[in-house]
Amino acid sequence: MSAEARLKEKNITLPKPATPMANYVGAVRVGNLLFVSGHGPVRDGKATMRGKLGKDLSVEEGYQVARDVGLSLLATVRANLGSLDKVRRVVKVLGMVSSAEGSPTSWSRSSARASASTPARPSAWPSCRWVFRSRSR
């Protein structure tokens, strides 16, 4: 099943990609590779949530924020390529979660980050190397 078909099947609507400001560029294409810049929990130019996981945000809220960021990344990819079906392989995903010191467990941070990759990962994309890093300060 293609990425676009999977989004449609799951009734997922991608947000409007963020408008680049100052020196920020959402993605850069080099040959047949697309390098996507870092994205945060922003919708319509405003942060949707702020805070640290385990202090200001519950694991469930962290999961939702990560999912929203993942959808935003997909929107940027679609805007640059015209369709998610043009993606042949995802090479690397780097997720960063700001969490309170000593909380939550590393499983909670991993769970929140993993939610960013679940919405539209089609079976057509081969498995890729998932690289995650946590920040606890």
Image (cartoon, rainbow, N blue to C red):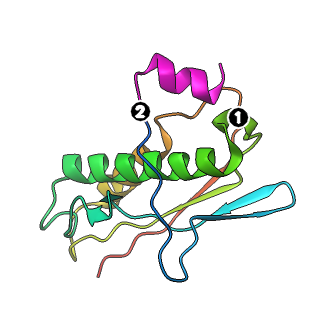
Relative image position of residue 45 (x, y in whole percent): 32, 64
The residue located at (31%, 71%) in the rendering is 98
Mark 2: give few (<14), some (14-19) or many (20+) Cα within 10 Å: few
Residue located beneath label 2 in the image: 13
What stretch of residues is rendered in magenta?
1-13
12 inside magenta stretch: yes
Lateral position of residue 41 relative to residue 127, left or right: left
Mark 1: give few (<14), some (14-19) or many (20+) Cα within 10 Å: some
Lateral position of residue 87 relative to residue 106, left or right: right
Name which residue type carries label 1: Trp
Residue located beneath label 1 in the image: 125
Q: In which quarter of the image is residue 41?
A: bottom left
Position of residue 100 relative to residue 49, above or below, is below
Relative image position of residue 47 (x, y in whole percent): 26, 64
Position of residue 19 relative to residue 87, above or below, is below
Between circles 2 and 1, the one closer to the viewer is 2
